[in-house]
Amino acid sequence: MTYPMDFSPRLIIVLLVSKLFIASLAVNAQKPVKRFDDFMAPVDIEMLLSGNFAELRGSHFHTGIDIKTQAQSGFNIYSIDEGYVSRIKVSPYGYGNALYIRHPSGYTSVYAHLDKFNIQIEQYVREVQYERRKFAVDLFPSENLIQVSKGDVIGLSGNSGGSMGPHLHFEIRKTANEKPQNPLFWNFDIKDNIAPRFHRLLLYPLSASSEIERAGNRKVFGLNRLNNNYTVKGYNIIEVADTIGIGVHVNDYLNGSYNRCGVYDLKVKANNRIIYQLTMDELSFAENRYILSHIDYDLNRTDRIKAHRCFLDEGNKFSGYKTVEDHGRLYVAPGEEVPVEVIAEDVYGNTSTLHFTLRGRASQSHRPQPAAAQILRQGETNQFQRSDVILTLPRNALYRDVFFNYEKRTGTEQMFSDIHTLHTSNEPLHKHFNIAVKAPGISDALKDKIYLASVADNGYTYSASSNIRFADGWAHTRIRSFGSYALMADTVAPEIAFLNIYDGKDMISDSQIRIKINDTETGIKSYNGFINDKWVLFEYDAKNDLLQYSFDEHMPEAVAFILKIVVEDNKHNRSVKRVKFSRSDATSKR
């Protein structure tokens, strides 16, 4: 046998093996990362997702998957396996009506934003709500109280709590440590042959001598796409100086849905060496706030773009990083050319790659450190003090060193202090910190109404903290964000508006009473409804400012009724509103 010039039998064998290896990678790329078959689907409709595991949200990584319910409530929700109901939470916020089921396999499944529970669970919850005279409850039934079999209907899908549209938020957690697992590891019938899509490349200068295309600030690049390969629009080579960081705006997409989802695995390779890898196998609620350091927080606030920063702040301790070389920071020497690949992969093995080349050059500038009133050090306890404001930041409140700036300006007539601008709200914080504001001239009678207001650039104010403690002429509280703040007083009681009831109305044709409640300053703290002085259960839909009571067996037996609604805000301002009504033949209708 003869061979072409420069090709030996050994070389041909190497090439054939390499070709087979590459082919096997291509095949494997279409296989799921993991697959388990022990759970059934929680719904019996097509599983289309509006959100997936570890998707970037505003202040957290998404801890489950969001299953679409055809923009409506009322679909059956099924227990994915046998087990028992270990927790039931009812809240006007967050997960709304949520069920937690422990399974013998060592996992707990979570079903959130439900419209209703099944009859057994609903009855149990209702009894506790009336016993405690509270709508919002957090219950932990004993193991033998509510047992379920695989496939049991446990409730109906809904839009309760903080949900912005009907869907099922579904999680699988390890029971031992409550850490959410990626539900797409289980073999639910979810179709996905769409690779992640890159939208932008971001490069960051990370030293005083760093430059990106001769500029000393972050630069955002547009991209070209050819199938699942991406290049930088307008640049064959990007010139950089010194040490830089790489970021990408990338999303995953699934079949049958236009919703932007999160990638499962994200790698950065420089000179064919992995310098950064993020893999989303599981999450921890204790670590979820590290997302504020992981994303480009400033870009998210200004342009609502959630971009992965593929390098780490000193204070970012998120455990999802599998490989981080030198904190993901890349030094490019003058004259050096560094080929870079950013590889995004989803759980189903669909992969996209962004290719670009960096060329190093000598820095033409050395930027001085930013002017600052004080440098706050990451990893240390920090205190900033002026004559009328004191900040105390605990250790590890910061993700990185902050060149802290402070300004003060005169407050408005409605304010009881100056406006204190603490650095910028575009700098994220990991922990709450203590703030003390000098509060001269506030009478003892008014102190109970004082709250700390956040003041936006347009002058709009909202409550940052209503929990104020006064000592020696100072108002003390805790907050979790930099920004502009001033002391204000909330003396206005909440508003109550009856929607489908009025004085003297016969309510026999109505199944429920609906009331609007609102408080524009410090927010609603409590809400209670009484019929003929007997407490009845009003459910609170906070996102719609709505109270609803469905006529039930707790309705007093009478001919005429007086409804009394009592609503209190977070500064103890109370509103009380009454209305007389009747329900002809009410006894037979119950």
Image (cartoon, grey):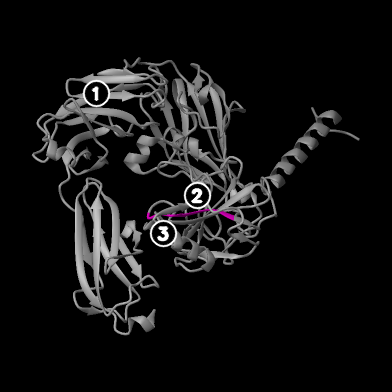
Q: Give the range drawn in magenta.
A: 85-92
At label 2, the amino acid type is: Cys
Q: Where is residue 464 in the image (x, y as percent from the top left)?
A: 27, 40
Mark 1: few/some/many CA within 10 Å (<14, 14-19, 20+): some
Q: Which mark is residue 390?
A: 1
Which sits earlier in the primary sequence, circle 1 or circle 2?
2
3 vs 1, front mark: 3
Q: What element carries label 1?
A: strand
Which sits earlier in the primary sequence, circle 2 or circle 3?
3
Magenta stretch contains residue 86: yes
**In percent of the image, x 72 and y 39: which residue is there?**
22
**In percent of the image, x 34 and y 42: which residue is there?**
303
Res. 534 image quadrant: bottom left
Q: Is residue 53 above or below residue 15?
A: below
Q: Position of residue 290 (x, y in %)?
A: 46, 34
State the CA–CA distance, disc 3 to disc 1: 45 Å
Q: Assign the N terminus to one quadrant of the image.
A: top right
Res. 189 image quadrant: bottom right
Mark 2: few/some/many CA within 10 Å (<14, 14-19, 20+): many
The residue pinned by badge 3 equals: 131
In screen coordinates, is 340 left or right of 502? right
Q: Where is residue 342 in the image (x, y as percent from the top left)?
A: 55, 35
In screen coordinates, is 461 left or right of 413? right
At label 1, the amino acid type is: Ile
Q: Is the magenta stretch mostly helix, strand or loop?
A: strand
Q: Residue 280 carries which label?
A: none
At label 3, the amino acid type is: Glu
The residue pinned by badge 2 equals: 261
- Name the residue nearer the viewer: 103 or 13: 103
